[in-house]
Image (spheres, rainbow, N blue to C red):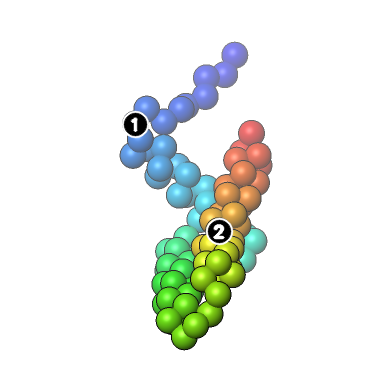
Amino acid sequence: MSITHSPSTLAESITDCNRSLDAALRRRFGVTLQTYKTLKALVQLAAAALAFYVVSQGGDPLTTFALFTAILIGPEAVETIIAADAGAETE
């Protein structure tokens, strides 16, 4: 009978998740977790600035913010899929 180690604190759980995500990102895309999160933040910031600019220039707010939402959700979806794949590989 084997005993599996489960994280006892939130900090340990987050650290384990980040390590797993970093390994999956390195395998799949060849980037580190830090690089991925930096690129994600820059893309999201640029999307927000562009959305506000388009609306201030008379663009349709509903369409603009729908596209903005899609841009925000995209990297989160990728991260979720990679984390799920990494979790499935460890089981």
Estimate the spatial distance between the alpha carbons at disc 1 and disc 2, rounded to whole Å: 28 Å
Please give the residue where the numbered disc 2 appears in the rendered image: 73
Which quarter shows the C terminus?
Answer: top right
Name the residue rendered at 63%, 50% in the picture: 81
54 over 82 or under it: above or below:
below
Q: Which of marks 1 and 2 is in front?
A: 2
- Residue 58: x %, y % from top left: 49, 82
- Residue 64: x %, y % from top left: 55, 72
| Mark 2 Cα-neighbour bin, 10 Å: few <14, some 14–19, many ≥20 | few
Name the residue rendered at 43%, 81% in the picture: 56
In terms of secondary structure, where does tag 2 sit?
A: helix
In terms of secondary structure, where does tag 1 sit?
A: loop
State whether residue 47 appears in this view.
Answer: yes
Say whether disc 1 or disc 2 marks the residue closer to the N-terminus.
Answer: 1
The three-letter amino acid code for the residue at tag 2 is Ile
The three-letter amino acid code for the residue at tag 1 is Thr
State whether residue 46 appears in this view.
Answer: no
Please give the residue where the numbered disc 1 appears in the rendered image: 9
- Residue 21: x %, y % from top left: 52, 51
Left or right of residue 40, residue 82 in this image: right
46 over 19 or under it: above or below:
below
| Mark 1 Cα-neighbour bin, 10 Å: few <14, some 14–19, many ≥20 | few
